[in-house]
Image: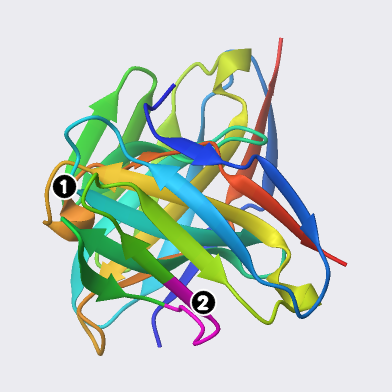
Amino acid sequence: EDQVTQSPEALRLQEGESSSLNCSYTVSGLRGLFWYRQDPGKGPEFLFTLYSAGEEKEKERLKATLTKKESFLHITAPKPEDSATYLCAVWGSGGSNYKLTFGKGTLLTVNP
Amino acid sequence: DSGVTQTPKHLITATGQRVTLRCSPRSGDLSVYWYQQSLDQGLQFLIQYYNGEERAKGNILERFSAQQFPDLHSELNLSSLELGDSALYFCASSASGQGFQETQYFGPGTRLLVL
């Protein structure tokens, strides 16, 4: 069974204090790994899709990387507006062709 | 604002009842996806429709069903409701039928409370 574990569950940073969020996964035949941002009471907002180990993608202060067992979301010099829950999901090919498994998320709080 | 609309925003009902959640995708998007988000299970993919046809199924219970109409709006029907069905239900849309490799745009969700 596909599994996604995100750590830490919660992270508090000071504005400007860079850090990384981790997403460890086990999946039968990885077809894609996704990162989303979710603000309280709102739907997830797509950030990145990574397809193969070694791939990296960047968007403003965020950079996502992928290895064969985990993905990292690096946040450089975060601002208070980066506070949100960050969700990781994997799309696997084992069993159902459309098996999408989400992690529980990391709640990021950036203090000014 | 993603352009995806969902109604109602909140719904309170009793166990055993049936409810219908509605979703209108972004203009021009052909695929609609339904997700359930609960505190204990996290976010789960339920089902995808593409241009009126069911395209993919996830962890959708038999008590739940969905459809997509010719105008591309979609409805998620939940029947014989149980306490454990209390959750946030999200709809998302994407441009075509390529599934998860396409960017999905999520609506604001419908919060369902079953008492």
Queried whether the magenta region covers residue B61, the answer comes back as yes
Queried whether the magenta region covers residue B14, the answer comes back as no
Q: Which residue is mark 2?
A: B64
What sort of colour scheme is used for the picture? rainbow
Q: Left or right of B83: which side holds B50? A: left
Query: Circle 1 — which element?
Result: loop
Tag 2: residue type?
Answer: Phe
Nearer to us of marks 2 and 1 is: 2
Q: Which residue is mark 1?
A: A55
Give the prevailing secondary structure in the magenta stretch.
Answer: loop
User: Dot 2 falls on which chain?
Assistant: B
Position in image of residue B45 (x %, y %): 42, 66
Query: Circle 2 — which element?
Result: strand
Position in image of residue A80 (x %, y %): 63, 15
Position in image of residue B43 (x %, y %): 53, 60
Q: Residue furthest top?
A: A112
| Residue at position x 80%, y 75% in the image | B83
Q: Is residue A1 above or below residue B54?
A: below
Q: Quadrant of residue B4?
A: top left
Query: Which range is magenta?
Result: B59-65
Q: Residues within 10 Å of mark 2 (few under 14, many from 20)?
A: some
Mark identifier at residue B86:
none
Position in image of residue A111 (x %, y %): 72, 17
Tag 1: residue type?
Answer: Glu
| Residue at position x 71%, y 9% in the image | A112
Q: In the depicted view, which residue is nearer to us: B105 or A33?
A: B105
| Residue B28 in view of the camera | yes
The residues tagged by marks 2 and 1 sit, at their Cα atoms, a distance apart of 38 Å
User: Dot 1 falls on which chain?
Assistant: A
